[in-house]
Image (tube, rainbow, N blue to C red):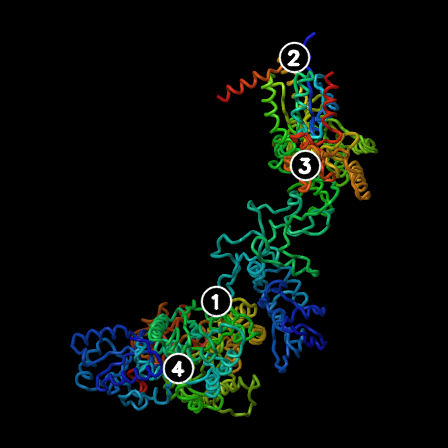
Amino acid sequence: MNRISDPKALASYREKLKAAQDPNKTMIHFCAGTGCIACGCEEVADAFKKRIADMGLESSVTLKLTGCPGFCERGPLATVYPQGIFYEKIGVSDVDLILEKTVKHGQVVEKLLYKDPTTGKKIVEEEEIPFYKKQMRLLLGSNGLMDPTCLDDYILLGGYEGMAKALSGMQPEEIVQSVITSGLRGRGGGGFPTGWKWDSCRKAEGKPKYVICNADEGDPGAFMDRAILEGNPHSVIEGMVIGAFAIGSNEGFVYVRHEYPLAVKNLNIALKQARQVGLLGKDILGTGFDFDIEVSRGGGAFVCGESTALMASLEGKIGEPRPKYVHTTDYGLWDKPSNLNNVESWANIPLIIKGGADWYASIGTENSKGTKVFALSGKISNTGLVEVPMGITLREILYDIGGGIPGNKKFKAVQTGGPSGGTLVVETEDEMVHRSMVRSGDVQVDETVKSLLDLPVDFDELTKAGSMMGSGGMIVMDQDSCMVDVAKYFIHFLIEESCGKCLPCREGLRMLHDILERITNGEGREGDVELLQEVSNTLIDTSLCQLGGSAPNPVLSTIRYFRDEYDAHVRDKRCPAGVCNALVGYAINENCIGDGQCVKACPSDAISGDPKGLYRIDQSKCIQCDACYQVCQFDSIVRVGRDEANDVQRRAKERWVPVKERPREKVGV
Amino acid sequence: MATVKIRIDGQQVEAEEGSFLLPAIQEMGVEIPTLCYYKYATPYAACRMCVVEIWDKRKKNKVVTACNYPIAEGLEVLTHSPRVVAARRTNLEMLMSRCAPMPVLQEMGKKLGIEEPRWGWGTDTCILCGLCVRVCDEIVGARALGFASRGADRYVTTAFDGEADSCILCGACASICPTEHIQLEEADGRKIIHDEVTLGPNSAISVPFRQAVPNVPRIDPEYCIHFRTGGCTVCSQVCPKDCIHYDEQEKTEEIEVGTIVLATGFQDLDPEILKPYGYGKIPNVITAMEFERMNNAAGSTGGKIQLQNGAEPRSIAILHCIGSRDERHHPYCSRVCCMYGLKFAHLVKEKTEAEVYQLYIDLRAFGKGYEEFYQRILSEGVNVIRGKGTEVVRAGRGRAEEGDLLVRCEDTLAGVFREIPVDMVILCTALEAHSDAKETGRKFGVSIGADGWFIERHPKLGPVSTATDGVFLAGVCQGPKDIPDTVAQGGAAAAEAMSLMIRGEVEMDAACAVIDEEKCCGCRLCNDLCAYSAITFDEEKEVSVVNEALCKACGTCVAGCPSGSIKGLHFTDPQIYAEIEGILS
Amino acid sequence: MSFEPKLVGFLCNWCSYTGADLAGTSRLKIPPNLRAIRVMCSGRVDPSFILTALSKGADGVLVLGCHPGDCHYSEGNYNCQRRLPITKSLVEQMGIDPRRVRLEWVSASEASLFQEVVSEFTEQIRSLGPLELKEFDFDRAAADAQLVHE
């Protein structure tokens, strides 16, 4: 491919590509993102390639391996164009079926269609699926339409149009002003207005200046940056070129974690392609502007997502943060003015330039513009990436898009912003939560509060509700989640990830973990909750960076909303959710039909009984592994307090009747 | 940078904009606890003990670390608000629960009102303040230390936990460590107690000795970190008068003078060449100079007389004439040893309970009051044995109870061979001329005697002057002598030099070469012969001319003149012929 | 009575003359045959002095100067060192054994060396016997020179 010498040449090249496309040719867009790789899509893709060759279909069908469209719950995914038929959960055995029926004869394979769980109707087209219906996929939309390793695909979708516009027709001040007007705020978590950051970096004294893309996505349960880098690396490159031009930088870095091999691979391919055709490097698009990007791989330290630690790591030093009393836009990488933005922020830039700041500003709420990608995980039906306009309610995200909580369980809380942002949005209508909030002084006793599920999701509203946007991870918890255990989980994660430089973070997290461990082990003492609060406040006040400063959030917010649960652990030595092993006893109630599944699952031979009779758990042998609970389909295994287990079983013995003698409707799956 | 006004604890103070808050607070006399701050390294802000509550000029309230918060106009600071005090307490308590009870933590705990952490003491002796790492990195420049692992598992170590190639063994990490977590050890695990024997610890910056002139410290480039790695420069930052300049190195200065007094002194004989005494091999065999250093109140034992293991010696032998009056080394008497040997005996008796043995050939107590002192020593119970100590050996198992060493000698008065068990042996080593005395002598036109000392012009008539006009001798460089004699000679040399200087003019020797213009053929042979360029050629008269002020009257030109036109006054040819004739008649 | 040679010594003021002094104060035994003439420097020793001494009845001439590099006048002894071989050859041409003229280096501190040199030189001259000056035959010498040239 030849160098694209100027913006006009780019436009004409795009036209040429469009003309060469055959709109009627069958295309199979097959997701090859990391999520689908985990579902085994590589084998399926190989099968597709092999079968297409075997059946001699090369000329009539094209297989395109795309990035992640977001619906990871249902992977591997494929969409067959031009009809736009959406297939889910494709196995190797389904390949022939698709090729035979859909490709050859244009028919729909019913069994691979998505079935709406509420209506039970099969849905053919992608846009009609509820998961996608309410989304606004400005960023992720392209992922399913293009091969990330193919520059032509990106150009065909209007790629580098924004860059061409910025470099040839706009002054740097104008670009910065556009970004300010667009209202784009940093997607990495802080929510600082991107335009203002660019402005101060542009005005900062000192040369050279650097632009950096933070792709050190470390929050558990967040993977939107990975999806963008894997599925559409050119959009990030384009955004960085525009940003560099606006700021006056000629050198950029992408700091990406080593655990994202596919992202690194695709990004490097994209960089090479862009350099080859003159979209990156010397004299970009013939405008005389030089800019190049270097990829730096991080060793996977969570703290390196913090800007100063990231820069230290880029410099080749230990990835430790330094106090930000002086901003990195003045003294950043190698003490030079540096502008650091997150992957998602960068990917938004081409859209703003191409579509115009006013268009972008029209999306979202007053102070939060555009869309935001959330990563849904945890106890939710549709895990995956969802991109929604700012201002959408949590209920819409969780129930309409996410499909609600599986297994008819009760929603308990959603944790946003990753472990260090780890704050909760809860169902405030819950009685227990309400009681805790009264204790913490959030509400009056007789005050009824609006459910937080109806909260419009944007930066400010979430902050007002005591949570934060964070990087966009959403971990959903249902009634089976113990909040003390959740807090312990996040603190444990942070202990592993704290760099250990400053005392409060290093020692405080250890202290918090010790106390939480004690509580979950049933050794909690009166005053432990206050101690947690004391240590947490010290961490917030005196930690060096935001890792430590926000680390106590999971603890404080769970105490705020679930103080009752803490008290149950400490005083009653009981885990209401039945999670904390040391506080839980397993018992078999009268629902037991005697199918013996639990006996097979039990690793410690604690369950005994006759087939079709009532089974019993020997409490002295039970190791609280939860295996029986997981396999029982009759809600017969219950998690109760340690002391209550035998009572439950005794009662069950009194009430139990053989299955045959039970009323009909009581038996059911 | 501009000076700005800030308020600290309600008190208005002026401070430099952009400088850090902690020094400004400390300057006010307000005490703020800190564990990781070191004035000469970049603030690290890791211990978070120095946190203060501030309101910036936008009235935004924050808790920040004072050690690295840059001062700006309108800053308001509370150093002991309940919020920060509580945070400090919790932080310290958490650190205590990690670490073993150590003085630095206990003291700080006392100040903050924590006797015992609620969670009990831990075991770690490192508080992870990072001082060692930063000092090694920023000040020493060796970069031998770093942190390994993350979070609570973090620890200070060398690269790959191995022996650090880049370590220069300066010991800065150990000296800065507030908890003695890092310690220096000798290779065989022995603690360094006896380094005073090497005449003082190897401090890189020190006054060379107490009476040094000028009495100022100097940097020893062999030990100075700056000269080894280019780092440090702490001393120049400490110096309030800006006196330290590293580029000011040793240089040669040329001073024009009319008179010179040579007082270059002597060197001690290195007793290691005297194998039988075991110096350098057997412990606690030391030289007189080392004993003096040990006895000095400013020395590192603080004037305590002790053995290498720190114990007090039970007995000491003082061996006279080590290398002096010895045909194999120096045939002359070093003159001072007898008296200082007696003085040592007196000091040992005064400071310790030790038994003292003096082993001498002849006791030369010749000065005023010297004999009386000798008598006093005898009355103090010092064992004075006539007989040279011939050998020092380690005592065998049987004798070790009395002393670790055995000194062998022949008691010539008693006529018996003796073996004396002692703990310490002091060798009264010979004074000898500097090894480079010959070179010095040549430089100043002063001859060296067979024993290496400078030769005076005349043993009786010119004891302080030399063969070279204007060069005088003082002190031991001319021959062994004690302090009174040295002072006297110094005075004499100074007086001689002064008399030359006060006169302001030099009386020339009447001897001088003159050229007979009539006879001179203008060959200029003499011009090149003259080492003093005293002969020049008069172009007009076409004859050579002698400058009498420059002429030293060596007569080389006289002998070399082919036309016999140069006359050496007082040594004229006729005079010498007459002399020859006279002595041969 | 045995032959007692008459020796003339030209002694440099700064080294050998002082050395002789030191030999005296050191009570070293020195043959009385040497008659010393003090010169300020061995460089002052004009070859004619040596010839004069020999012609006036000396049996040997000893010139003593400072060790090379130690000259009080920097390089007077070097000049002497250069002159002496010429003087010796001149003496030889006159029919005198050149061993009767000798240059030695003796410093101010080398009293014993002075003693040694003088004793040894005295013994040498003693063995050579008294100097008998013949009438110098210039024509013969010229003819010899001619022969050498041819």
Residue B160 spot, x, y in % from top left: 47, 56
Front of the two marks 1 and 4: 4
Where A437 sits versus A545, above or below? below
Residue A315, label in figure: 1
Residue A163, label in figure: 4
Q: Residue B487 lies in what quarter of the image?
A: top right
Residue A127, label in figure: none
Type of the residue with mark 1: Glu
Does residue A418 appear left or right of residue B340 in this picture? left
Residue B421 spot, x, y in % from top left: 67, 31
The subunit carrying tag 3 is: B
The subunit carrying tag 1 is: A
Where B431 sits versus A337, above or below? above
Residue B569 visible in the shown view: yes
Type of the residue with mark 2: Pro
Residue A451 spot, x, y in % from top left: 47, 90
Q: Residues within 10 Å of mark 4 (few under 14, many from 20)?
A: many
Residue C130, label in figure: 2
| Secondary structure state at the residue bearing disc 3 | helix
| Secondary structure state at the residue bearing disc 1 | loop
